[in-house]
Amino acid sequence: MVVVEEPARGLGIRVAYSLAWGKPVSELDPGPLRAEEERLLEELKSRYSLETLRNDPVVRAYRDFYWRIGIDPTKTRPSSEALVRRALRGRWPRINPVVDAGNIASARYMVPIGLYDAGQFQPPARITLAQGGEEFHPIGGDPERLEKGTPIMIDSRDVVMHLYPHRDSRETMIRPETRCILILAAGVPGVEQTRLEAAVREVQRLLGLLGWQSCSELEHA
C-alpha cells in the first residue's frame, strides 16, 4: 500500500505502516484515552524539560533531517517534538479520538505519525520527491504549490497526501465519518526501524481501547 521510491530512499526515508478500522470516528467515546493522556504527561515530565528536549537523540535525528531538506527545525518543529513541547507546557491537544490516539503514540515514541482516511485516497501511496508545481492542500492552511525536490507522499491519482514528515493534507484527513485508516510512522536516518514499529503498535493498542481493530502484521517500506 505504501512505496518509498528511490529518490526519497536516497534521503534515508523509511516507514512502518498498517491499517485500522471500526465505528465512525463521530461515534467513538474518547473516555478510554484520558487515563492514557495523564500517564503520558507524567512520563514526559519525568524524562524531559523544555531545555533538555532538544538533546534527545531522536529529536536530533529529525531536526538534522529537517535541515537536510531545507526546513529550519527551530521555526518549524518536527510534529512529535512539537507535541512533547505542548505537553510540557500543559497544553495537550484534543482533536478527535483517532487523532488523539495517534498523538499519544507520537509523543511517547517521539516519531511523527500520519493518519489517513483510507476511503479518501487511491493506493498505492508513494513517497517520492516533488517534480515542482504540485498543489498541496494543508490542514488548516491555504493551497500551495510545491518546490521541486520536496519529499511528499502521493496516491495513485497524484493527490499530495503529505509533506514528509510534517504536514498532512485536508483531502485525506480523519473525518467524523472515517471508518478505516492508514497508520504511518515516518522514519529518518538515525531512527531505528524498531521504534517506528513500536509507534505503530502503540496507535493500534490505543485504537483497540476505542473498539477498533487493526491488521496483525506491520508493513515496511
Image (cartoon, rainbow, N blue to C red):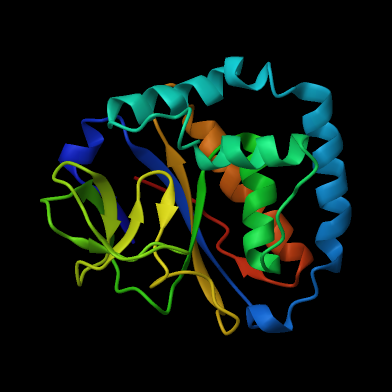
Seen in the picture, residue 73 relative to 210 is either above or below; the reply is above
> 202 above or below 207?
above
Which residue is depicted at the point 82% across and 40% down? 41
On screen, residue 220 above or below 44: below
Q: Nearer the viewer, residue 49 or 172?
A: 49
Quarter-wise, where is residue 179 in the image?
bottom right
Residue 194, x across and y down, in percent: 54, 33
Residue drawn at the location 39% of the way across and 77% of the way down: 120
Image vertical order of residue 4 relative to residue 208, above or below: above
Residue 177 visible? The answer is: yes
The residue depicted at 43 percent of the width and 46 percent of the height is 166
Residue drawn at (39%, 62%), measured in percent from left and top?
Answer: 138
Q: Give the image quarter of residue 155.
A: bottom left
Residue 174, image x, y percentages: 53, 71
Q: In which quadrant is the N terminus drawn?
A: bottom left
Residue 170's x, y, as percent? 42, 69
Number of callouts: 0
Left or right of 53 on screen, residue 92: right
Answer with the quarter of the image where residue 164 lies: top left
